[in-house]
Amino acid sequence: MKTIALILTGAALLTAATPANQASAQKPKTQAQQRADAAEARGRQLRKSLAAAQTNTHKSVVSVPPDAVQVEPNLYRHTDAQGKTWLYRRTPFGVSRWEDSPSSKTSPSPAAKEDAPVTATDLGDKVQFERKTPFGSTKWTQKKTEPTAGETSPQSQKKTAEKQ
């Protein structure tokens, strides 16, 4: 009984998938459906042309002015007629422009910033150092006989030679 049901189900699926049945299943479109399809196609074409017109009108090409001063590679500074100072950077995607703010002129470079103050505690033959960081305090200990990285640098060797 099960085999007969499987065979009939398979036969029904095969006959439903034949091209002759598919062709007869398609009904001709009515005039109302044809008009709706044509209106949809016109609407799609109109939206594409409007989008193209909007992208063309809003596209402005930024370029580095010829009298701009090069600050560093690919970075230029220029003051316009209104007195505003603009920075221009050449990137792989084109030139980007932004207004120079007074804070960027006065901010020290990362190399010029000093480290947070370090407190040292004498523990006999060792010294414990502690530095406050944004992530909490950092503590480390070091033997007094071991030189630090700063003490082994050429500048510190010069200073120790001058002291002697």
Image (spheres, rainbow, N blue to C red):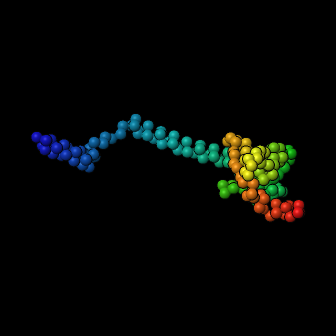
> Eyeballing the image, is 53 above or below 163?
above
Quarter where residue 136 is shown = top right
- Residue 103 position, x and y percent, is 81, 43
Q: Residue at x 86, y 64 (%)?
A: 161
Residue 93 visible to the viewer: yes
Q: Residue at x 70, y 50 (%)?
A: 141
Q: Nearer the viewer, residue 35 or 131?
A: 131
- Residue 115 position, x and y percent, is 77, 48
Q: Nearer the viewer, residue 60 or 29?
A: 60
Q: Which residue lies furthest to the front in this view?
A: 124
- Marker count (numbered): 0
Residue 99 visible to the viewer: no
- Residue 106 position, x and y percent, is 84, 46
Quarter where residue 32 is shown = top left
Q: Which of 41 and 14 is in front in this view?
A: 14
- Residue 118 position, x and y percent, is 77, 46
Q: Residue at x 74, y 57 (%)?
A: 145
Q: Which residue is drawn at 86% across and 45% down?
A: 83
Q: Is residue 42 left or right of residue 130?
A: left
Quarter where residue 133 is shown = top right
Q: Residue furthest left?
A: 1
Q: Residue furthest top?
A: 32
Q: Is residue 24 left or right of residue 66?
A: left
- In the rendered image, the quadrant that contains the N terminus is top left
Q: Nearer the viewer, residue 141 or 19?
A: 141
> Eyeballing the image, is 152 above or below 1?
below
> Eyeballing the image, is 72 above or below 82?
below
- In the rendered image, the quadrant that contains the C terminus is bottom right
